[in-house]
Image (cartoon, grey):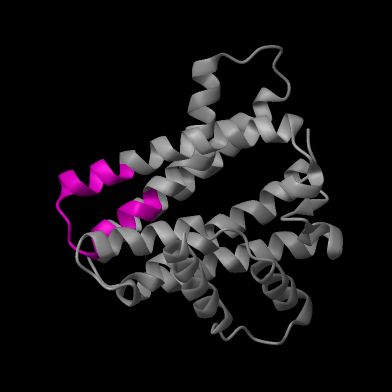
Amino acid sequence: MDFLKNYAEFVEQEIKNLELPSSPIDLYDPLKYFLAIGGKRIRPILTLMSGELFGLKKEDVINGALAIEFLHNFSLIHDDIMDKAPLRRGFETVHEKWNQDVAILAGDVLMIKAYQCLAKQQGDLKKLMDAFNQSAIEICEGQQFDMEFETKESVSISEYIEMIRLKTSVLLGCALKLGAIAADASKVDSDLIYNFGVNIGISFQIQDDILDLYGNPATFGKQIG
């Protein structure tokens, strides 16, 4: 798995190279903190791999990869607030370490940073933006379904699958699609690799939800339940 480690280290270095302002301190320190606690960086790695699959160097798709990672982290910061989660990746969540208002604003800035990165990405900007925006909207739709399910007495398997498709899986699909679009792959290939990512995402989220019920918080990195 050394090749994945190399991709992850490349992404980590690019994130460290970001020049975030030092002031206001309670806006940018939470961003620096949350980005520094890491994660697997699977989504940006998928963008890099997709770009290379269609003929680009990983350096040519790093802006799209960072855009996906920032969108993902934006959603995590806000999800943690809604879930009242004390831990993320084994560390205090932003709203716990600072407060809810700080976390909301930090997440908002991270989303804008995502768009700044996407605007720098080579390729058809309209196609890139369309794919990115569609996934961003669907993530919010998935989160809303998730919250609605909390008050329902029963949720069907098909409803659950659709919720996790929106909340989690479309972002993996988008990560792959951005790399394909940046490399000017055909629509057929872009759609195929998007669907591949969505299906991976569904399987991942099913496993993650099982861990959320039965996992060990010490190794899972989040509060179970």
- Where residue 115 sits, quadrant-wise, is bottom left
Query: Which residue is at a point 70% across and 77% down the rendered structure image?
Result: 28
Nearest the viewer among 69 and 3 is: 3
Quadrant of the frame with the C terminus: top right
Q: Is residue 66 visible?
A: no
In the foreground, 138 or 219: 219
Q: How many marks?
A: 0
Q: Is residue 115 left or right of residue 21?
A: left
Compare residues 48 and 98 and report the one nearer the observer: 48
- Hey, which quadrant is residue 121 in on the image? bottom left
- In the image, residue 71 sits, relative to residue 139, either above or below, namely below
Which of the 4 quarters of the picture holds residue 15? bottom right
Q: Is 149 situated above or below 224?
A: above
User: Which residue is rendered at x = 77% and y = 81% of the image?
Assistant: 25
Q: Residue at image x 33%, y 70%?
A: 61
Residue 51, above or below 11? above
In the rendering, at what x and y percent does residue 164 appear? Answer: 53, 33
Residue at screen point 40% across, 39% down: 198
Give x and y (percent) for residue 146. Answer: 63, 31
Q: Is residue 71 left or right of residue 82?
A: left
Whether residue 116 is visible, yes or no, is: yes
Where's residue 134, x and y in %?
39, 47
Q: Please report the bounds of the magenta region as a residue range.
A: 174-194
In the rendered image, residue 57 lying in the magenta stretch gets the answer no
Residue 159 vertical placement versus 127 (above, below): above
The secondary structure making up most of the magenta span is: helix
